[in-house]
């Protein structure tokens, strides 16, 4: 035990000042300049083992439960899946026909044909414990070709977009985060509105809707593709309430996201087939529309 | 020399465990009560080894929390550095506190750290006031005696000083 009385070389106050200066520089660079993407990517990659370790107990428990499932429940599940599969294949046949027809009509109208999309399944490995943000972490990163601004959907509809990537993880901001907004179009009336998150689970607010709007409760909002981030035509939310308070400049319209954002597990990452970003090292699948179209069209 | 590296590794492992606990999935009902594990471990090491673990470690752990939680970089860095200061300054006095007195102090420290993060979030990201954000101050205080005793055991076993 040889701790001298005055071992401290730099006084605590100086250390505190240094740490605070560093912290404020970080806040300024990250918040005001948005200049930290490279550093964030590096830090996310460094910290990702912690994230994987944190979900390991839960995952192994799930695994155990899965292994202990009885034969009968597995058979029942298999039956159900087969039925679903048949159902979906039936729908898909019609869908492929419609997609072909749609493409032919679009060429007749001389508009752009729909571009193909690639997708990859990602699993949510962490939901944020920070109540100020609505984000999840998924188990795919730059190694799989994930990029910042990439749209993310699930089986029901749009979930959000990628805000941060590490090598093997990516952080997805959800539609309901208060800093997120998505351009949408009402399916029935074609009215364009921007749906913004308010920081509450399962609530979006539609911005700048006039009192005279034709929007109705129950209307489905689809992504309009206008912002350039989300592809067109994916379901986003359903209108739940329209409050026309004439003392306010705009009607207050609330909507609930179609995707179950509070219990998402499996997500789909989307790539455009002709963009500079492409999926890597994974089992990416092409979307089914218009696979062998060129011959068909001639 | 080797002993020193081992000791540093022990300290780092406790911090990594705390970070894992900080992001481990919990059921939504009890998630708001999750104690602020990284800060608990930080306070322990500061009052145990104030000459080795102080504001530098605090800033480092804070930055790791920022990255893990996806908040703007620097929020927790600043908050942890600020609450580490009184702990490092008055460590000798805190050591003489009883466990319950220390728990009260931990409650105040966690509350202050969260208040600092909340102020940043409020002014920079328009976060609304959520009282349940401050509940972990209570649960952290409840868990302090266990954290303290466990980490002391670890420290004595591996002769970290």
Image (cartoon, rainbow, N blue to C red):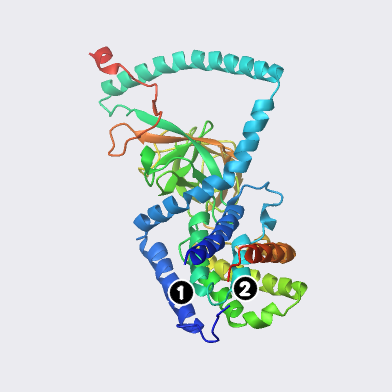
- Asked if the residue at tag 2 contacts the one at tag 1, i.e. Cβ–Cβ closer than 8 Å, the answer is no
Q: Quadrant of residue B50?
A: bottom right
Q: Name the chain letter of the residue that bears numbered label 2.
A: B
Q: Most extreme residue toward the bottom, as rendered?
A: A6
Residue A134, position as x, y percentages in the image: 54, 51
Dot 1, crowdedness within 10 Å: few (<14), some or many (≥20)? many
Q: Secondary structure at mark 2?
A: helix
Q: Secondary structure at mark 1?
A: helix
Distance from disc 1 to disc 2, alpha carbons, whole Å, reads 21 Å
Question: Quadrant location of the C terminus of chain A?
Answer: top left
Q: Residue at x 42, y 75 (%)?
A: A21
Q: Residue at x 62, y 17 (%)?
A: A78
Q: Nearer the viewer, mark 1 or mark 2?
A: 2
Q: Name the chain letter of the residue that bears numbered label 1.
A: A
User: Which residue bears the numbered disc 1?
Assistant: A19
Q: Residue at x 65, y 66 (%)?
A: B156
The circle drawn on residue B48 is 2
Whether residue B63 is situated above or below residue B86 in the rendered picture: above
Whether residue A161 is situated above or below residue B122 in the rendered picture: above
Q: Quadrant of residue A67?
A: top right
Residue A53 visible in the picture = yes
Q: Residue at x 49, y 78 (%)?
A: A16
Between residues B41 and B27, which one lies in front from this camera angle? Answer: B41
Does mark 2 fall on the same chain as mark 1? no
Between residues A4 and A230, which one lies in front from this camera angle? Answer: A4
Q: Quadrant of residue A216?
A: top right
Residue A290, position as x, y percentages in the image: 34, 20
């Amino acid at each position: 035990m040889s701790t001298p009385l005055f071992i401290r070389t730099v006084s605590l106050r100086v250390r505190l000042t240094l740490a605070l200066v560093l912290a404020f520089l970080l806040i300024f660079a990250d918040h005001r300049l948005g200049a930290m993407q490279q550093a964030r990517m590096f830090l996310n990659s460094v910290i990702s083992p912690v994230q994987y370790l944190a979900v390991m107990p839960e995952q192994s428990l799930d695994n155990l439960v899965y292994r202990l499932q009885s034969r009968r429940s597995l058979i029942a599940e298999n039956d159900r899946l087969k039925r679903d599969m048949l159902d979906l294949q039936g729908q898909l046949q019609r869908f492929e026909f419609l997609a072909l027809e749609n493409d032919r009509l679009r060429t007749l109208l001389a508009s752009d044909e729909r571009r193909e999309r690639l997708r990859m399944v990602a699993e949510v490995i962490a939901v944020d414990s920070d109540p100020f943000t609505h984000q999840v972490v998924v188990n795919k990163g730059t190694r799989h070709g994930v990029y910042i601004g990439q749209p993310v959907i699930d089986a029901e509809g749009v979930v959000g977009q990628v805000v941060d990537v590490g090598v093997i993880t990516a952080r997805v901001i959800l539609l309901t985060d208060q800093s997120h907004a998505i351009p949408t179009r009402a399916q029935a009336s074609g009215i364009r509105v921007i749906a913004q998150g308010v920081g509450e689970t399962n609530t979006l607010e539609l911005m700048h809707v006039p009192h005279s709007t034709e929007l109705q409760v129950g209307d489905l909002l689809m992504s309009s593709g206008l912002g350039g981030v989300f592809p067109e035509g994916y379901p986003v939310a359903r209108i739940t309430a329209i409050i026309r308070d004439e003392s306010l400049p705009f009607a207050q319209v609330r909507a609930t996201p179609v995707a179950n954002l509070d219990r998402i597990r499996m997500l789909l990452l989307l790539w455009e087939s002709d963009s500079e970003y492409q999926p890597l090292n994974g089992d990416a699948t092409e979307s089914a529309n218009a696979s062998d179209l060129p011959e068909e069209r001639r | 020399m080797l002993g020193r590296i081992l000791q540093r590794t022990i300290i780092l492992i406790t911090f990594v465990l705390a970070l894992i606990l900080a992001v481990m999935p919990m059921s939504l009902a009890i998630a708001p009560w999750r104690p602020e594990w990284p800060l608990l471990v930080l306070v322990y090491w500061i009052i145990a080894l104030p000459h080795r673990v102080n504001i530098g470690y605090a800033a480092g752990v804070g930055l790791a929390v920022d990255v893990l939680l996806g908040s703007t970089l620097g929020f927790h860095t600043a908050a942890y550095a600020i609450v580490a200061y009184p702990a490092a300054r008055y460590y000798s006095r805190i050591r003489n506190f009883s466990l319950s007195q220390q728990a009260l102090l931990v409650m105040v420290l966690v509350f202050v750290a969260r208040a600092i993060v909340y102020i940043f979030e409020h002014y920079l990201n328009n976060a609304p006031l959520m009282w349940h954000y401050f509940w972990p101050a209570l649960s952290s205080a409840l868990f302090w005696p266990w954290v303290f005793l466990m980490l002391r055991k670890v420290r004595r076993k591996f002769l970290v000083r």
